[in-house]
């Protein structure tokens, strides 16, 4: 179907979608262009010299953007997995509560998410200093886990609210132990929500800035921290390349979540 064959009523919707797509993609296109331009000064509309220096630095292992990229990826993967391991039983425990108990529990879990990141980071920083983990990657990971566990506990609260536990009761009746029931019955049923939860925990850590700066103390150089440093130093080309890389996991996660939502069948109680 061509645009000429569109009915009149479809034109406003089509134009609105095109405007939305343009507004969403324009910043990414500008960043991509800036990341490939060595010199681009006002008021010129076209960069003078194209260069791949920023992308080479981004892919260089062990130093510069390459090292920061590896640190961010390692922290985010570990945060996603550990937050899922902690958040799953917490969310399931909350789903078993009723009335005021569930509301109070959900509010306590949501508190680290709702609290201002700076205030939360100062408290965590003091704790990490006493534990000797300030300025270290494990300390930053522990700080990232605080909001990530809050998000995933609420996520699994929703998952287990609509979960039919009678399949587990049937497995227990047939002689399966608690651990065997969990691994052979529960995990296969909620496999897709688990993968989505790991992705959500990954994203919480991936773009985390305040907690990384406060707890890491500048010693833990993640990609968002390097991005801010490049902006302060006026290195727009490197900052644009880092900003593009930061958006890739978020775009991939959103695409996977949409695809999973179309294929997921909710187990109703």
Image (tube, rainbow, N blue to C red):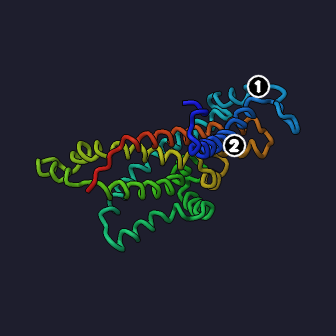
In front of the other: label 1 or label 2?
Answer: 1
Q: Quadrant of the C terminus?
A: bottom left
**Distance of mark 1 from mark 2, alpha carbons?**
19 Å
* Side of 60 relative to 73 (left or right): right
Determine the secondary structure under disc 1. Answer: loop
Residues marked 1 and 2 touching at CB (< 8 Å)? no
Residue at coordinates 11% horizontally, 47% vertically from top-left? Answer: 174
- Residue extending farthest bottom: 100
Q: Residue at x 55, y 52 (%)?
A: 133
Which of disc 2 and disc 1 is earlier in sequence? Answer: 1
Give the class, few, some or many, for how many residues have Cα within 10 Å of label 1's Cα (few <14, many ≥20): some
In the rendered view, does 214 fall on the left or right side of 97?
A: right
| Residue sitting farthest toward the right | 43
Residue matched to label 1: 51
Image quarter of residue 261: top left
Tell me residue 30's x, y (percent): 72, 37
Height in image: 183 above or below 153? above
Give coordinates of residue 157: x percent, y percent. Answer: 37, 58
The image quadrant where one finds the N terminus is top right
Q: Which residue is mark 2?
A: 227
Q: Is residue 232 visible?
A: yes
Q: Position of residue 118 (x, y in %)?
A: 63, 61
Of all residues shown, which one is farthest toward the left? 174
For residue 134, side relative to residue 29 (left or right): left
Q: Quadrant of residue 249?
A: top right
Q: Secondary structure at mark 2?
A: helix
Where, by quadrant of the figure, is residue 96 drawn? Answer: bottom left
Query: Can you give x and y, in whole percent of width and height, for residue 266 in the image?
Result: 32, 49
Query: Neighbour class for label 2 at 10 Å: few (<14), some, many (≥20)?
Result: many
- Left or right, 26 with respect to 260, comes to right
Residue pictured at 31% horizontal, 67% vertical: 97
Specify whether residue 221 is in view: no
């Amino acid at each position: 179907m061509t645009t000429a064959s569109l009915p009149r009523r479809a034109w406003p919707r089509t134009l609105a979608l095109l405007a939305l797509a343009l507004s969403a993609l324009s910043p990414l296109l500008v960043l991509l262009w800036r990341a490939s331009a060595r010199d681009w000064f006002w008021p010129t509309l076209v960069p003078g010299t194209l260069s791949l220096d920023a992308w080479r630095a981004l892919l260089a292992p062990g130093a510069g953007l390459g090292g920061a990229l590896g640190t961010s990826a390692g922290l985010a993967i570990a945060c996603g997995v550990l937050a899922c391991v902690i958040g799953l039983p917490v969310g399931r425990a909350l789903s078993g509560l009723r009335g005021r108990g569930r509301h109070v529990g959900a509010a306590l879990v949501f508190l680290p998410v709702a609290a201002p990141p700076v205030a939360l980071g100062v408290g965590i920083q003091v704790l990490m200093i006493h534990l000797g983990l300030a300025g270290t990657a494990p300390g930053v990971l522990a700080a990232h886990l605080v909001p990530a566990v809050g998000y995933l506990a609420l996520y699994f609260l929703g998952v287990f609210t609509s979960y039919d536990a009678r399949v587990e009761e049937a497995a227990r009746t047939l002689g399966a132990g608690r651990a065997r029931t969990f691994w052979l019955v529960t995990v296969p049923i909620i496999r897709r929500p688990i993968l989505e939860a790991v992705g959500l925990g990954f994203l919480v850590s991936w773009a985390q800035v305040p907690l990384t700066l406060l707890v890491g103390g500048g010693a833990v150089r993640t990609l968002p921290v390097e991005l801010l440093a490049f902006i302060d130093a006026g290195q727009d080309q490197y900052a644009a390349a880092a900003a593009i890389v930061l958006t890739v996991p978020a775009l991939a996660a959103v695409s996977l979540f949409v695809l999973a939502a179309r294929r997921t069948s909710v187990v109703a109680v």
